[in-house]
Image: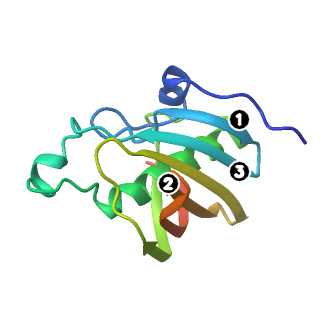
Amino acid sequence: MTKDTSMDINQILDHLPHRYPFVLVDKVLSYELGKSIDAIKNVTINEPFFPGHFPHYPVMPGVLVVEALAQAAAILSFKTINDKPNDHSVYYFVGIDKARFKKPVIPGDQLKLNVSIERTIKGIWKYKGIAMVEDEIAAEAEIMCVLKEI
């Protein structure tokens, strides 16, 4: 199966419940329904977390790198089930396993997000995510999410 086309920020916002300042995916390069997604987060000094993390050497918090992976996973999941976020449901983390942080992410970096669906069982989606800067792994994790009605 060939990969589908890219998504711009307007299409991303249509498939993510998040809004500023918490949108952590700037562009989707490609995705294959039910399989994987490749996306980008451009990291700039204007991010709201940098003044406090750390003022003398700004570093993107590792939990936000994992959140960026989860947002890419959410886009893939919504595209796969041919649905969009709404006011009657929330896409929650239910687990993060094997998280490893190998390289600090700093202003000016372009974070390349690759997420693949490992399996879905009883409404719980499990993914493998890798975040890279240039050709180096910055972080990786197995994440689990669920779409819950509220």
Secondary structure of the residue carrying tag 3 is strand
Residue 90 x, y percent position in the rendering: 45, 47
Instruction: Specify the color scheme.
Output: rainbow
The reply to whether residue 81 is in sight is no
Type of amino acid at the residue the image marks with label 3: Ser
The residue that mark 3 highlights is 36
The residue that mark 2 highlights is 70
The residue that mark 1 highlights is 82
* Structural crowding at the residue carrying mark 2, measured as other residues with C-alpha within 10 Å and reported as few (<14), some (14–19) or many (≥20): many
Residue 138 x, y percent position in the rendering: 45, 62
Type of amino acid at the residue the image marks with label 2: Ala
Q: In this view, does 64 lie above or below 128?
A: above
Q: In the image, which is nearer the foreground, mark 3 or mark 1?
A: 3
Secondary structure of the residue carrying tag 2 is helix
Along the line of sight, the residue nearer the viewer: 17 or 55: 55
Mark 3 and mark 1: Cα distance apart in space: 15 Å
Task: Give the residue furthest to the front.
Answer: 135
Mark 1 and mark 2: Cα distance apart in space: 18 Å
Q: Residue at x 51, y 56 (%)?
A: 132
Which quarter of the rendered picture does the N terminus lie within? Answer: top right
Sequence-first disc among 2 and 3: 3
Type of amino acid at the residue the image marks with label 1: Asn
Q: Residue at x 16, y 56 (%)?
A: 57
Sequence-first disc among 3 and 1: 3
Q: Which residue is drawn at 53% across and 32% down?
A: 27
